[in-house]
Amino acid sequence: MRSNPTRPANMVSDISKASIGIAGAGLLGRLLAWRLRRAGAEVSLFEAGSFDQPLAAAQTAAGMIAPVSEAVATEPYVYSLGNRSMQLWPSWLSEFEAETGICINYSRQGSLLVAHPQDLAELNQFERDIQRALITDTQHVPYQRIHSQGIRELESDLSDRLTEGLFLPDEAHIDNRQLLRELIAHCKQLGVQCFENTPAEVFAGEIKTADKTHAFDLVLDCRGVGAQSQWSQVRGVRGEVMSVQTREVSLSRPVRLMHPRYQLYVVPKANNCFVIGATQLESEDRSPVTLQSTLELGSALYTLSPAFAEANIIELKSNLRPALPDNGPQVEINDGLLKINGLFRHGYLLAPVVVDHVINWLNQGEAMPYDQLLGLAEATLSNDLSSNPSIQEQHLA
């Protein structure tokens, strides 16, 4: 993440009067198109795939919004940014419902981590990692250690063999596909010019497609892995998910199964569906899900609840998460062009706070807490970040 001490001279000064082109209609692109159009900008949105089946990782994601769970394996700033997004999601979804009459399925009932008796060491280590990463005082402990009765009270359909767990109340999940679907529909209703099946290259003030060069006051590059040809540091990290459907199991929140080789997650969706994932491979292979992954996901799911045995597999998907070398989000600023990338596996956790900061910066608003971190200003980090020397060394160099 780089600081950008000066604002380019020809950057738009009033977004309500600006024409803005956005390349990439994943989660970032759609949120930006919606928020910028609401602010009065003339917006055009370009997607290399179809809007119904976008190439973006947001389409195949599980839609978890899990700042505590992710804090264990990431830099502390991810937790801070994620907490800000946890504040933005409810207000933005309320605004969306007021505009459209559509309620996006969003649930803040926490998440549950469990382990089989032979794997309790993994759960205990995760608890120690949370304590080390997040607990700086006794005012707020972001989890509860629970046992058999507590697990049954939260999720009665889980296996009786699961006797130890951690409940993380400050987490949420969202119906990602419903959100993506309704966002693009609303953008069209608002007058956003939408171009699907239209691969594009981005330049200062221009988006070039196969048959035309489109001129804008400002271009935003939100193409994720699709930006690799113009941003060499972007890499893809393979993920695989399975979707099943069954009436035999009911879950109210995401459940993670701790295991020595992987952390399986199961996220409930509408219509008795569940999204299951665990794999994260440093590979840019887009080939279909392997038999080995399918067997591992299925067998681990069965151990969570034997009732999943009769579930129908309705989808197997692989995709690439866009990542930068430090696995954190970054905004690169040039005259007439902003490149926004690197949300990695934190798309739904970080997208709102990134979008909020970008639009505030375009509006030339007051400095916001994470401008420096995202590369939007040369400013002092907020207290919860500036006190961590490792973050300063990594992100202010």
Image: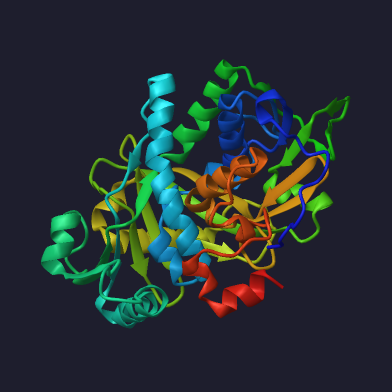
Give how far across and how far down residue 178 sits, in percent.
45, 33
Seen from the viewer's position, the closer of residues 314 and 234 is 234
Seen from the viewer's position, the closer of residues 312 and 252 is 252
Which corner quadrant of the image does residue 364 belong to?
Answer: top right
Q: Specify the quadrant that holds the C terminus.
A: bottom right
How does the figure colour the protein chain or chains?
A: rainbow
Q: Residue at x 83, y 35 (%)?
A: 205
Which corner quadrant of the image does residue 148 belong to?
Answer: bottom left
Left or right: 57 with respect to 248? right
Q: Residue at x 54, y 22 (%)?
A: 185
Above or below 244: residue 162: below
Give how far across and how far down residue 366 sits, in percent.
58, 47
Give how far across and how far down residue 340 sits, in percent.
68, 49
Give how far across and how far down residue 86 sits, in percent.
40, 50
Residue positioned most to the left: 149
In this figure, what is the number of numbered marks?
A: 0
Q: Residue at x 49, y 27 (%)?
A: 182
Q: Is residue 276 visible?
A: no
Q: Is residue 44 visible?
A: yes
Q: Residue at x 83, y 44 (%)?
A: 335
Left or right: 32 with respect to 267? right
Left or right: 332 with respect to 237? right
Q: Specify the quadrant that holds the N terminus.
A: bottom right
Above or below 355: residue 136: below
